[in-house]
Image (cartoon, rainbow, N blue to C red):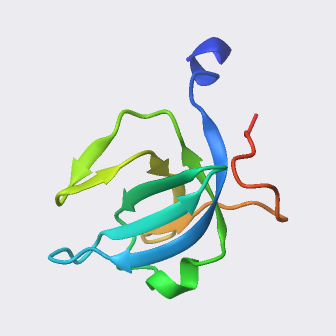
Amino acid sequence: MTIDEFQKADLRVATVIAAEKVEGSEKLLKLQLDVGEPRQIVSGIARQYAPESLVGKQVIIIANLEPRIMMGLESNGMLLAAHGENGEPVVLGVEREVPPGSKIS
């Protein structure tokens, strides 16, 4: 991958405003985010994270993916996570608070 290709990914800081389990799914959470504007993302992290534990946290998302429908809900971006020792997702965040929507470079 070239640096030009990498720079096409719009990585942003988002603040989680609300989170809830997706009805009918064991692994999906619906997240309402502030990315300088409201945005909804559906993410497969429900087995590792209680919804209330994410509210107020700042996370990293890819903001310029095409919308995707998951369990009937539109997801407008992707939450970034590392893989833990056992392959479980570990949500990526920032070291200190920054304005929602801050671009990552």
Viewer-nearest residue: 89 or 38: 38
| Residue 99 visible in the current orientation | yes
Q: Is residue 91 above or below residue 52?
A: above
Viewer-nearest residue: 12 or 33: 33
Query: Would residue 14 appear left or right of 19 to someone viewing this image?
Result: right
Residue 36: percent from the left, percent from the top? Answer: 67, 49
Q: Is residue 87 above or below residue 77?
A: below
Query: Would residue 101 appear left or right of 81 to someone viewing this image?
Result: right
Which quarter of the image is occupied by the C terminus?
top right
| Residue 87 visible in the current orientation | no
The picture quadrant where one finds residue 23 is bottom left
The picture quadrant where one finds residue 73 is bottom left
Residue 101: percent from the left, percent from the top? Answer: 69, 47
**Residue at the spot x=45%, y=82% of the render?**
51
Counting labels gives 0
Query: Would residue 27 appear left or right of 55 to someone viewing this image?
Result: left
Residue 79: percent from the left, percent from the top? Answer: 49, 54
Which quarter of the image is occupied by the N terminus?
top right
**Residue at the spot x=55%, y=85% of the render?**
53
Q: Is residue 11 above or below residue 8?
A: below
**Residue at the spot x=17%, y=57% of the render?**
72
